[in-house]
Amino acid sequence: MGKRSRYKLLTYFGVAGLITFVASLVFNRTILPKKTPTPKELYVISPSTYRFILNQPELCEKKSPFLVLMIPVTLKDTEARTAIRRTWGQDGLIPRVTVLHLFVIGQPAQSDPVLQEHLERESKEYGDIIQMDFVDSYHNLTIKTMMIMNWIATYCRGAWYAMKIDADIFLNVRYLVDYLHDQGEASRKDYISGSVISDAVPHRDSFNKCCL
Ligand SMILES: *[C@@H]1O[C@H](CO)[C@@H](O)[C@H](O)[C@H]1NC(C)=O
């Protein structure tokens, strides 16, 4: 390559780079929404941030379960809870294997005393509800997940495995228990399993559900 054409190449990339830089400045200023959260949106998630309204602190005291199913739901999901208790969440589904299930709930943005009273009755009857005082919303699911992990670490340290599972899923508990047994004793420590997404790409669309 001659000196001249090398310069040409450099100039070309220089100009292209400058255009990209200017374009990104304009684009970021005018088109993309501001990403910095306002102070109102920033809140600390620590185990001491939220309080229990309903808890089951003694659930794991008598017996260390093989598996604890933690199911995030909202106050109004009464039917889903009933369906799960009758199907994959029922006690004694797998002989000689203790599988517990717990529904994890926040609070509705607008308080609903009637539903809340129903929930408290449900909690007394089935003993499978944990409720904390953060607002239940899509964006607060992070808080719920943290609280689920914290609950296991605080009240159910003896559990072999814990699983977070949505209420609109049908879980094959028998298959899962067999699968976990096959992983052997070593998998009781530092073990994580789930569906691996290996072809993920960043969400670029600011109207995507993820980023609104
Ligand atoms: C999340 O929960 C906090 C604590 O209850 C509340 O202040 C906040 O408004 C909630 N955020 C959303 C998006 O609902």
Image (cartoon, rainbow, N blue to C red):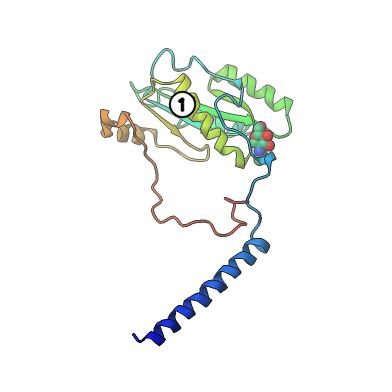
Residue 94 seen anywhere in this rendered image of the structure: yes
Residue 86 seen anywhere in this rendered image of the structure: no
Please tell me which residue is depicted at 60% across the width and 26% down the height of the picture: 49
Where residue 144 sits, quadrant-wise, is top right
Give x and y (percent) for residue 156. 44, 21
Three-letter amino acid code of the residue under disc 1: Gln
Question: What SS does tag 1 mark?
Answer: loop
The local crowd at label 1, few if under 14, some if 14 to 19, many if 20 or more residues have their Cα within 10 Å, is some
Q: How many marks?
A: 1
Q: Left or right: 183 with respect to 128?
A: left
Please tell me which residue is depicted at 26% across the width and 30% down the height of the picture: 186
Q: CB at mark 1 closer than 8 A to ligand 1?
A: no
Nearest to the observer: residue 99 or residue 135: 135
Where residue 129 sits, quadrant-wise, is top right
In the displayed structure, 124 sits above or below 134; it is above
Please tell me which residue is depicted at 74% across the width and 33% down the height of the picture: 110
In the displayed structure, 123 sits above or below 39; it is above
Q: Left or right: 59 with respect to 30?
A: left
Q: Left or right: 21 with respect to 181?
A: right
Q: Left or right: 209 with respect to 180?
A: right
Residue linked to disc 1: 90
In the displayed structure, 3 sits above or below 132; it is below
In the displayed structure, 168 sits above or below 87; it is below
Give x and y (percent) for residue 2. 35, 87
Please tell me which residue is depicted at 47% across the width and 17% down the height of the picture: 59
Nearest to the observer: residue 79 or residue 110: 110
Give x and y (percent) for residue 169. 48, 40
* Quarter of the N terminus within the rendering: bottom left
Give x and y (percent) for residue 85. 51, 28
Name the quarter showing ligand 1.
top right
